[in-house]
Amino acid sequence: MAVSVESNTNTVCAGVTVLLVDSDSTCLTIISKMLRTFGYQVITAKRATDAFCVIQAREYKIDLILAEASLPDMDKYELLETISDMSGIPIILMSADYDRKAVVGCLFKGAMLYIVKPIAMDDLKNLWQFAFVPEPENVSTVDEISGIEDAPSMESATGVDERRNLRKGKGKRKRSDEMQDDKEEDNDGTVIQKKPKLIWTDDLHDRFLQAIKVLGIKAHPKTILELMNVPGLKKVNVASHLQKYRLSLKRQQETIQKTMDIGSTIEHVASNHVLSEFDPREVLLNFSDTQTMAVAQQQDVVNCPTWENLNGDMPIPCTDFNQTGDEVTNNEGLEPFQQMGNSEGLLLEETDIFNDGDYTSTLFDDFWDW
DNA sequence: CGTAAAATAT
DNA sequence: GATATTTTAC
């Protein structure tokens, strides 16, 4: 990494490679552009897991990481800890909220700097300097001082952990005006991370569908979960999704009934449509390779119409159980998800797509308020 | 444990 | 205001 400190402002940062991590496409684009005008080399990632792939692949020598603090798939403390464990690359966080506690917490957890969005050019101009700050020898014991709870370890790669369930007494939910950030404070002052919301991406949903295809319509959450074999996915997640799935099935069936009542002429056409064979898309679920990341990002948008693209109604998946409810029994020797690789790509809390302008990313609430 | 319904979040 | 997801209650 040759850093040329030239008098030309624009090339001050030449040679410094920044890994930019932000789930928000617009942020990613804008900040990336800004960085490049200063001469940074920029690699982008939309999720923490993607960032980890880039780091671990070591295809690039990354000098600096600039990451959004509230990534959908991992909380900031865990992010800091994981990255410093695996690379020691200096990390700079950014966030739209000016939360002093979060800022200080992140600094104690090893962040070099915490920038509050919106990001200005001047914020980025001198960041390259952090690439040269030597790593501190012992980072431990900081936690005791700061009183910040240990971030969960990498075992739960998705940032989904049980700590919330360990709380004493399930008191009432917090009022929404207390639930600003992704954390809350316990009565002893311990900062507790909230579980990010799980997002059922097309891929995750496909996996769910395939599990159901194998298990039959009366599959139960537990078995579905087992068959799906997605790290970090919880039974409640599946149960909830199953509930919604059944609802949408019911709705479909009802509308079908109606159309059949109206005219018997179209009857057979309609049922043919509904019962069309489930489309087993080729193996697309592997997010663990670096090379698939770009593909994955595109897939999020381009993929076949399911669910999100269908106004909230789930697609009818397969013929095996639609009408009869009979289970499918040809699952002998079937290991449907074996070859799909471990799907690390659990997406939490926020899609990286701008979906029909209904909601824009929270990161840009500053600019477009509702 | 599973499901339905209520609550919350976005 | 709708919908997706979580939490609660049974």
Image (tube, coloured by chain):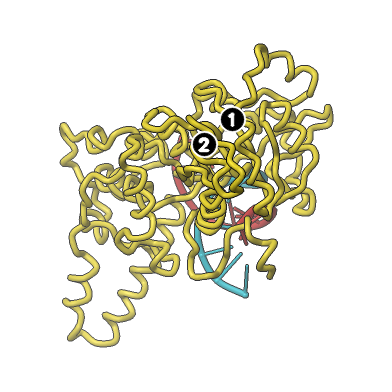
Chain colours: A yellow, B red, C cyan
The answer to whether dots 2 and 1 both sit on one chain is yes
Q: CA distance from mark 2 to mark 1?
A: 8 Å
**Residue A53: % across, % down:** 41, 33
Q: Do tag 2 and tag 1 residues touch (Cβ < 8 Å)?
A: yes
Question: Relative to A142, is A6 on the left or the right?
Answer: left
Q: Is residue A159 visible?
A: no
Residue A333 in the image: x percent, y percent? 16, 31
Which quadrant is the C terminus of chain A positioned in?
bottom right
The residue sitting at 16% across, 34% down in the picture is A332
Residue A138, percent from left and from top: 67, 12
* Image quadrant in which you'd find residue A118: bottom right
Label 1 Cα crowd, 10 Å radius (few <14 / some 14-19 / many 20+):
some
Q: Can residue A56 be seen by looking at this rendering? A: yes
Q: Residue A272 versus residue A75: which sits nearer the camera?
A: A75
Side of A92 relative to A311 (left or right): right
User: What amino acid is at disc 1?
Assistant: Ala
Q: Which of these two is toward me, C7 or A256?
A: C7
Residue tagged by mark 1?
A131
Q: Quadrant of residue A323?
A: bottom left
SS at circle 1: helix
- Label 2 neighbour load within 10 Å: few <14, some 14-19, many 20+: many
Q: Nearer the viewer, residue A306 or A118?
A: A118
- Chain to which mark 1 belongs: A
Of the image marks 2 and 1, the number of the one nearer the N terminus: 2
Q: Nearer the viewer, residue A219 or B10?
A: B10
The residue labelled by disc 2 is A16
Residue A48, percent across and down? 50, 38
Q: Residue at x 53, y 33 (%)?
A: A3
Question: What residue is shown at x 63% (from left), y 20% (from top)?
Answer: A134
Is A116 placed left or right of A83 in the picture? Answer: right
- Please state which amino acid type lies under the numbered disc 2: Val
